[in-house]
Amino acid sequence: MRRKRITVQGIVQGVGFRPFIYRLAHELGLSGWVKNTPDGVIIEVQGEGGVLEKFVEDIMLRKPPLSRITSILSEEMDPIPEESGFSIIGSSQEGDLRPVIPPDVAICEECEREIFDPSNRRYLYPFTNCTNCGPRFTIVEFIPYDRPKTTMKVFEMCEECKREYNDPLDRRFHAQPNACPVCGPRVWVEVSDAFDFKPSSLSLDGDPIAVVGRALSTGMIVAIKGLGGFHIACDARNDDAVSELRRRKGRAWKPFALMCSDLEEARRVVQISKREEEILTSPQRPILLARAREGNGISPLVAPKNPYLGVMLPYTPLHLILFRHSPQTLVMTSGNFSEEPIAYRNEEAKERLSYMVDLFLMHNRDIYVPCDDSVIKDMGLGTIMIRRSRGYVPTSVEIPLDSPPILSCGADMRNTFCVAFGREAVPSQHIGDLEWAETFSYYERAIDHMMGLLQVKPIAIICDMHPGYISTSYGMRRARELGIRTLMVQHHHAHLASCMAENGILSTCIGVAFDGTGYGEDGTIWGGEFFVGNPIDGFKRVAHLKPIPMPGGEAAIRRPLRMAWSYMRDSGLDPTGLLDEKEGRIIDVILERRANAPFTSSMGRLFDAVSAMIGVCTEETYEGQPAAELEMVATDVWDPSLPPYPWEAIELRDRILISLSPAIREIWHEHKKGEDPRLISARFHRTISEMIAGICSRISEETGIRDVVISGGVFQNSLLLSDSIRLLKELGLNPIIHREVPPNDGGISLGQALIGAAKLGG
Ligand code: ZN
Ligand code: ZN
Ligand code: FE
């Protein structure tokens, strides 16, 4: 008889780890106990020597799917002769253990088997879940994470469900959203009242999910309540349905996401590598951006001019059951108009979505906080998170220094906020663009919710330096109310710190921060910046694009031809003909008088200008469209040996000014000659990556620093990112890129948190 004390660390709480240990001990006939502690899960087990070894081995081999073990420490103990049985020591003795709320998790294999097993009591039940799967973050109102603190509180468990819930040997032991057809939530269909809709050929009788499946097959548009909010769905292979959806949703060009019935279907739609398959089928089930397959039958209106498609697999039982009746690939776009926040309450959805859909597939499991689908792109050299939301939030990111409790407010576009404490930072779900009143109220509510769940009382609030940011004024007001301090962080410093935070780096690096817009330390708009620094001592701007006037300010973003005009004038070219006579004259007056023409060193605006100049995209209908389309056209003809265009580095007293005028002149010349815009775009991409490598190598020679941190929304561009990395490596430099957190403004809040932790921590 021997006894062992085993300490398991990692992601082992809130993932069904204790019941798993309980079941394992039972199976092997061991006695002892298991409990959660602030240092991890502690287990004491007693039994025969060989069995104890097997126990430890099985912990590693059979651990719950959502757990991640970072260490197992086992010590010999003196056996306790009179001990019998194995117990889970309750949560009352967990001390000051920080509550862990898990993210929402896609349906597990066992639950999937049950819903398609006619003999199972959950046959075709769309709210089936267990300890290993189902809703979490989106249904939790407050802590502790127990059923009465979730939106499941209104459903009283039936005897059978209760038995499962209370049985440590059952897969549903303490599964808070546990439910069955007898006692749980249900679905129903509602007809939109906005249309004069007479379901003549469509019977609304029978199984609501089957009704909706049939409706989708006939080309109808349906709002479907999911895990983190409503989706709007239609048959992705039906041109009429997709074009009607575009019209109703007020969305001209921005690609729609797709949901495929299963992996086989996804393979018919896009090309999927081994790594992409893992991403698609992971418990987080994000939207994967992958190369479209030829002849996939998907309507070209789903993602016009785009060789990539965003696909995901079903992640709730409701989706799986729906695909038994519906077309095999559905458009599954967020239930919102344009960029408003996603609808998630039944009444609200009816109000806001009625005029976009024919039917609603409703259910009565309330969503407490909405959470959009996450988006990931595989860049060949690793994966880049485009949007980190459902499935990932509220998982924390480990940061390389101790943080006092702080809240960072993020940026105004693609907003996320972040709560940090100790070595953890918790970036929020995707909030969106704060300029929308509805988005802003969602923002305030989401912050209160998250602070409640994490039980964090911030000692400071970190905001962007931009005086006009809504998030900044929110942060200042909130800090005043709470009587705590505020810290302003420059936008691009935050981008770099964000990348350093998730890579665990505090040492001085070269930083490349390229994006669309960020308020600079000198009051101009930055966005094509090179720095040297670290989150503790700060960052020094050492090189940047030559600032160019943005005629009409923000208006130039939506009308990239104006940016092209400005760049061409600056390069000594005659842009006549690019705009009609009247608009051209207006722009020239603006440029001459320097009124309402703020200067910008933004790389995003340079991409806009080139995209418009060569006729790839002359109107921005969604954020980043001109740059995205410029990348897309280059993808087909991409060749890393294409020659770059010339560019110039001008040495100033304290920094380098980078002028792309020589490139602009040659691009215009080639365009006039009738050169293929795809080739021009590819060579332009090559120019920017060569410029990055050139500037970084100069900075490295001067400073001896070899680490190059790369961040900012421009680096969602696969061609630019991979080519830059290749060149930097060839120079013996060490590029450091994002993996867990988006390079775009969705990552800003994490960077603000790291800088806040560095400045305010001990
Ligand atoms: Zn399950
Ligand atoms: Zn039940
Ligand atoms: Fe940015």
Image: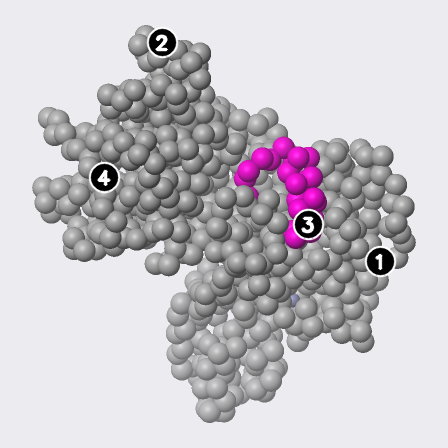
Viewer-nearest of discs 2 and 4: 4
In this figure, which residue is indicated by the disc labeled 1?
Answer: 207
Q: Identify the residue shown where x is 29% and y is 28%.
A: 601
| 127, above or below 604, in the image | below
Q: Which residue is mark 2?
A: 589
Residue 658 lies left or right of residue 651; in this view the side is right
Q: Secondary structure at mark 1?
A: loop
Q: Residue at x 51, y 34 (%)?
A: 622
Q: Please report the residue visible at 49 percent of the width from the left and 62 percent of the height from the top.
A: 271
Numbered label tally: 4
403 in magenta: no
Which residue position holds label 3?
Answer: 238
Q: Within 10 angstroms of label 2, few (less than 14), some, or many (20 or more) residues?
A: few
Residue hosting label 4: 645
Which region is colored magenta? 233-256
Q: Marks 3 and 4, Cα distance to the nearest angstrom?
A: 43 Å
